[in-house]
């Protein structure tokens, strides 16, 4: 369970901005941010999806690509150029936090076109207590995702704090107990102090092994609060992901 909400803190009193880290270089799916899916570039789909959330004060694309920046300018999307030296979306979000003040920074990767207002609203609720520095989301894992290393799994404690994130199947079902499996959704909430800490720490050993940047927080003792949502997403990393998202969008569906 996440900490109780402060009844004196309202949505109007919190300034919440969404940051969409977007780089053009991609190893598995080259130039994917500008790849058209159902007639729209991937980045445009994600920006428009995030913009639908009424609780957000601002949505900004953070990029190191002049081509992406110019695309955003043409489409009327708010965008900022950031350093080409960043190794993760969290580092890019931190740079935005140094120039745009907010209470909460919602980090939505540019390859998450099925993001819903419900995702962001749930995450804002997780982040409402001041003691929560980092939050994220989980959803029941589909059968095909349980053993898929491309789908990150998460296990949490009784208070809803992450115990671990892994590309492996966790928990391991040794005796056939059929435990619930949860897929981690790559949408985060950060407070400024958490982002400041993140960029001061070196890359952690588990982060390096799993290639999961959120493990840097756990290895350095910062709790990550995880809320449950019934709405899955598809992060676009492969041609198969492109086909799945296109089928959903052309069918007029928002539920995965």
Image (tube, grey):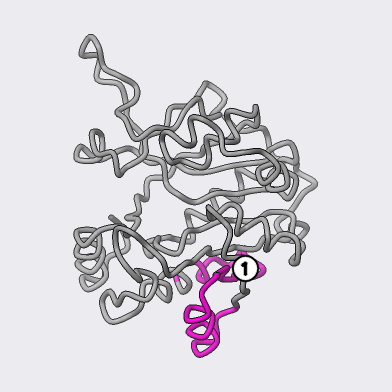
Residue 78: image quadrant is bottom right
Compared across the picture, whether 31 is left or right of 19 comes to: left
Residue 115: image quadrant is bottom left
Residue 35 in the image: state x and y as whole percent: 32, 74
What range of the chain is rendered magenta? Answer: 49-78
Q: Is residue 4 magenta?
A: no
Q: Quadrant for the N terminus, please.
A: top right
Compared across the picture, whether 189 is left or right of 237 comes to: right
Q: Residue at coordinates 64% horizontally, 70% vertically from top-left?
A: 58
Q: Residue furthest bottom?
A: 74
Q: Residue at coordinates 48% horizontally, 53% vertically from top-left?
A: 119
Closest to the observer, 9 or 34? 34
- Answer above or below: position of 29 versus 183: below
Q: Residue at coordinates 62% horizontally, 58% vertically from top-left?
A: 93
Residue 85 in the image: state x and y as whole percent: 58, 60
- Answer above or below: position of 157 versus 196: above
- Answer above or below: position of 43 versus 156: below
Closest to the observer, 210 or 246? 210
Q: Residue furthest front?
A: 85
Q: What residue would you read off at disc 1?
A: 82
Q: Quadrant for the C terminus, please.
A: bottom left
């Amino acid at each position: 369970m996440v900490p109780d909400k402060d009844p004196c803190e309202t949505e109007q009193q919190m300034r919440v901005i969404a940051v969409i880290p977007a780089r053009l270089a991609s190893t598995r799916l080259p130039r994917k941010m500008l790849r058209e899916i159902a007639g729209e570039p991937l980045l445009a789909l994600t920006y428009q999806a995030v913009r639908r959330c009424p609780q957000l004060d601002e949505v900004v694309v953070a990029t190191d690509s002049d081509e992406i920046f110019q695309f955003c300018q043409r489409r009327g999307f708010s965008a900022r150029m950031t350093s080409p030296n960043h190794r993760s979306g969290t580092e890019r979000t931190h740079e935005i936090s140094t120039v745009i003040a907010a209470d909460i920074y919602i980090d939505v990767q540019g390859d998450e076109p099925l993001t819903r207002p419900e995702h962001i609203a749930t995450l804002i609720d997780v982040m409402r207590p001041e003691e929560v520095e980092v939050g994220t989301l989980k959803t029941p894992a589909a059968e095909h995702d349980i053993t898929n290393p491309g789908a990150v799994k998460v296990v949490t404690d009784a208070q809803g704090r992450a115990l671990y994130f892994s590309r492996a199947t966790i928990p391991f079902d040794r005796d056939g107990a059929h435990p619930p499996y949860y897929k981690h959704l790559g949408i985060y909430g950060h407070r400024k102090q958490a982002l400041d800490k993140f960029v001061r720490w070196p890359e952690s050993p588990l982060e390096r092994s799993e290639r999961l940047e959120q493990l840097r927080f756990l290895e350095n003792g910062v709790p990550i609060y995880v809320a449950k949502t019934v709405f899955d997403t598809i992060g676009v990393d492969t041609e198969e992901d492109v086909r799945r998202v296109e089928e959903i969008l052309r069918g007029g569906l928002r539920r995965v």
